[in-house]
Amino acid sequence: MDVEVLGRVLSTLPSDDDHPYRTGPWRPQTTEWKADDLEVEGEIPADLDGIYLRNTENPVHPALDGRYHPFDGDGMVHVVGFRDGKAFYRNRFVQTEGLLAEREAGQALWAGIAERPAKSIRQDGWGARGRMKDASSTDVVVHAGVALTSFYQCGDLYRLDPLTLETLGKTTWNGDFPSTGVSAHTKVDEHTGELLFFDYGTDAPFMHYGRVDADNKLVDYVEVPLPGPRLPHDMAFTENYAILNDCPLFWEPELMKKGLYASRFHPELPLRLGVLPRRGGGKVQWFEADPTYVLHWVNAYEDGDEIVLDGFFQGDPEPTDTGDGTFYQRMFRFLALDRMQTRLHRWRLNLVTGQCKEERLSESITEFGVMNNRYGGRPYRYTYAASGLDGWFLFNGLVRHDVVTGAEERFSLPEGVYGSEPAMAPRVGATGEEDGYVITLTTDMNQDRSECLIFEASRLADGPVARVRLPERVSSGTHATWAPGSAIPGWSAADSAASAVGL
Ligand SMILES: [Fe+2]
């Protein structure tokens, strides 16, 4: 392994930190690495060609009011690239305006999501509620050859070189960008090269949907009126439709008037699913379903008069404080999959009758389900999801669901080893949906290391075919993606992974 330190960030976090989402498997990294020809146990498949990108939260300063939430941490992107049976790695902080301002100040300047906006030192800021730091730490996709990081409370889309992870600046479309920012979970349709997105905020109409074409031009930006401020997190799409949501879990309106942002689940209200034409906008058709909160959708597709929509139904979107567990376990019970009871679920939306039928697809508690993105918006069969450690926001295994037969295959990580959201990487020349690999990064507390695990997608339970050693243990985090080499400028002209990044 050829390793070099590219940079270090000065952290002002206390050395005796006891916050579980800033220590242990969530210990933030402060070093930016460049490592080539990584050590491998097993063999990297020669037909694995492209990059796995993962975004993570890495706080640098203590929270202003002492109530740090893991989603407040500054975005750091990791890339593991594969070519010709070899692998390289980089990790870089996203150089957000907020990170740079706090670096200059040597302290936090904005209150986190579990703190009152009034506590922010800076009057300005980002986020649907305002006066937050846009940490750009939630999600990452590759569109038009550039990696785009995003923030779940809405913010800018930061453009990163997908290989060096150098921050190139903030996205604008035709020189413009939505004033509310854009939510995490932008969607890339690999068939058309389009980027679909939504934003949300506290001012009417409370939500917009947008479409950017393959040349990075904003071609649609339409209103999606809601009854009030909502907290949507994800969207879905089919070949012809965009699917947005109005979940009955939102900021308490009376408290908002006092500057407090506390969310509450309303079991008396339905889940509303909004379908609108993907191109050109048009009237939103709303469907009502059983009340729940859906954090993540897996996929959607058209089936005759119906839209089939798969995602994760929360059996308990607002887990009660039972008094069990540590203070932090109680505070962050909303992040534990077992507490939220997240199960794979299917909604069928009939565009002619306006009716919605729904069914549970699995009894297993999983979330963060991904699929082969070439099947995005099209009929598909397999999703690869994460299982969670009881009581914590940590992934302890992978589950492959066959949404046609209901069959499941599982791989469990050893105790003390945690995984990241997986990504499915079709092999070069793939001929079928599961013809490829599933990739995840581990945070191994037993050996104080991280590895990139590569599985045959069709044989998840057999365990990884290769383990690629990273230079340092990485923090746990949120979302990841796969981009084939063919989607990355300069990749095909390079004769090796190292030369692809200009070495
Ligand atoms: Fe998410």
Image (tube, rainbow, N blue to C red):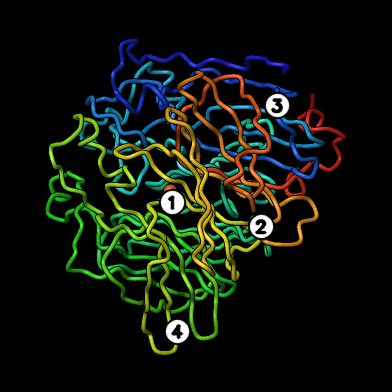
Residue 268 vs 47, above or below: the answer is below
Q: Earlier in the sequence, mark 4 or mark 2?
A: 4
For discs 3 and 4, the disc positioned in front in the rendered view:
3
Q: Which residue is mark 3?
A: 40
Q: Which residue is mark 1?
A: 183
What amino acid is labelled 4 in the image? Leu
What amino acid is labelled 2 in the image? Glu
For discs 2 and 1, the disc positioned in front in the rendered view:
2
What amino acid is labelled 3 in the image? Val
Residue displayed at 17% across by 68% down: 268
- Name the spot of residue 43 as percent of width and height, x first: 74, 33
Residue displayed at 68% across by 16% down: 3
Q: Are marks 3 and 1 in contact (CB under 8 Å)?
A: no
Question: Does 396 sit left or right of 44 as displayed?
Answer: left
Q: What is the C-alpha distance between the residues marked 2 and 3?
A: 24 Å
The quarter of the picture where residue 433 lies is bottom right
Q: What is the C-alpha distance between the residues marked 3 and 4?
A: 50 Å
Residue 324 vs 405, above or below: the answer is above
Q: Are marks 1 and 4 in contact (CB under 8 Å)?
A: no
Residue toward you, 5 or 198: 5
Q: Are marks 4 and 2 in contact (CB under 8 Å)?
A: no
Q: Earlier in the sequence, mark 3 or mark 4?
A: 3
> Split into 4 quadrants, where in the image is the N terminus?
top right
Q: What is the C-alpha distance between the residues marked 2 and 1?
A: 30 Å
Q: Are marks 3 and 4 in contact (CB under 8 Å)?
A: no
Q: What is the C-alpha distance between the residues marked 4 and 2?
A: 30 Å
Residue displayed at 35% across by 54% down: 342
Q: Earlier in the sequence, mark 2 or mark 1?
A: 1
> Split into 4 quadrants, where in the image is the C terminus?
top right
